[in-house]
Amino acid sequence: MNSQAFLICFFIYLAAMIWLGWWGSRAHRGSGDDFLLGGRKVPLLLTIGTTIATMVGTGSSMGAVGFGYLNGWAGTLYGLGGAIGILLLAWMFAPVRRLRFMSMAEELSYYVGGHRLVRNLVAVLIYLASLGWLGAHILGGGMYLSWVTGIDLAVAKIIVAIGFCLFCIIGGYMAMVWTDTVQAIVLFVGFIAMAVFSLIEIGGWSRLGEGMDDAALSFLGFQSIGIIPAISLAAVVGVGVLATPSYRQRIYSAASESSVRSSFLVSGLLYLGFSIIPAIIGMAARSMAPDLDNPGFAFPYLTTQVLPLWLGMLVLIAGLSATMSSATSDAMAGVATLLRDLFTMVTGRSPEEAKLVRYSRIALVTTIAVALAFALSSDNVITYITRMIATVMGGMFVCGVLGRFWPRYNWQGALATLVAGSATSLAVIANAEWNALWGNPILPAVAMAVLSGVVVSLATPRSQVSHEQAMARINQAREQGDGVANSEQA
């Protein structure tokens, strides 16, 4: 493929997305709430579009295709876990839309009496999670661009970071929603076309998996990677969806509870059907090029060496669309946390509403720059994502579920949950034998987070703070910027 032609098409596409973001956000730039949450009026179709675009991101494109290249049908696990996660999110957390939270830190602190310490710790973890996701998207997009154009990988990562920064710096959340919706269409068409042409190229479905071990062709690749690691991979992706702040933003910004629930149900079912496609693409690439140095390049290999020029161009742009659409979501979630929670925690006051849009843009550039620094230090998407989710999000997932459904849960239990989840994950990562056994740290991290949260909650006094009082504390923090009143009747 002509790398110069691809770059020209990519920059034209990027310019079109920037214009679309500007056009779609022109009525939502007046306030901080407009910039960060689209005025809480995002309609059903746009919520579906932006949710799907976020789900079909770096992990389910480059990461899952590369995993399918190595492990056959195990490449389906990423999409399966994501679909289960979004369907559970619709069932368990869509009702929080009526509470009008502005960040996930507010939500998790609400469950335990609006406790300031819990909110602050969650805010730190959420911001780290947003940086981690952003780093993964920059890494995946940079690998695409580097392979196709031959430019240095570090330079490619910088170009990708600048590209999605421009998407949302102009119009904020609504710019992201509009561009995500268009990119969802592009990436679905591109990925499906790639799977079909790949099957034609290798001679049909019967030739899929030729040259691979029989274990890789087993049900969901269980025999290839092991049952426990397979469950861990699906679980870590599902937990990632349930604890990732960008998905919570879909809830907070939707026009209504029914709208967000419907959009998640549709997105989950579409993603469930999509989950098989990365595995097919990866296995087809293995049949055609069994000796790739880096499995992460399986996707761009097919686009540049196998597909017709016009289709390869479409698919490559679809791949970059998947990366950038997900990245913009995590960037906006990180900025919302930085300004609504961390700014208040550090300064003792809320940002001035009149300056919030300007502050948001500055925070956006800063957040992307830090994530870029993370991305420059890694070259394995799946490892990067799974370890980051387990360490940063496992405890937040448990905190959200226990807080939402167990009235006895208190702020002491929440702190124990968050600390135990991260500590367990780091311990597993540090031990090669444990890491090999579990595949990734999510299962032991979640188990220890649940155990610690339950034991500590039962061993400490029941919270006497009602949900109404907790909401009042959160509202006070928004209005006065002096943190939630910390006279905890815990």
Image (tube, rainbow, N blue to C red):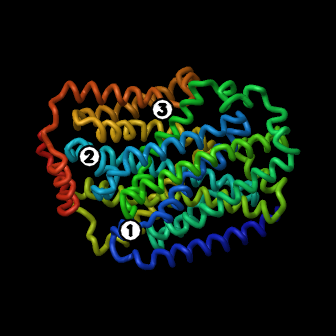
150 horizontally vs 236: left or right: right
Q: Which residue is mark 3?
A: 442
Mark 3 and mark 2 in contact (Cβ < 8 Å)?
Answer: no
Residue drawn at (74%, 54%) of the image:
147
- Which residue is nearer to you in this view: 416 or 20? 20
Q: Nearer the viewer, mark 2 or mark 1?
A: 1
* Residue 41: mark in rendering: 1
Whole-percent x and y of residue 57?
58, 52
Going by the numbered disc 1, the residue's amino acid type is: Lys
Question: Are there few (<14), some (14-19), or many (20+) residues within 10 Å of tag 2?
Answer: many
* Residue 139: mark in rendering: none
Whole-percent x and y of residue 32?
33, 69
Asked if residue 189 can be seen in this view, the reply is yes
Mark 2–mark 3 distance (CA, rounded to whole Å): 23 Å
SS at circle 2:
helix
Going by the numbered disc 2, the residue's amino acid type is: Ser
SS at circle 1:
loop
Q: Which residue is mark 2?
A: 109
Going by the numbered disc 3, the residue's amino acid type is: Ile
Mark 2–mark 1 distance (CA, rounded to whole Å): 24 Å
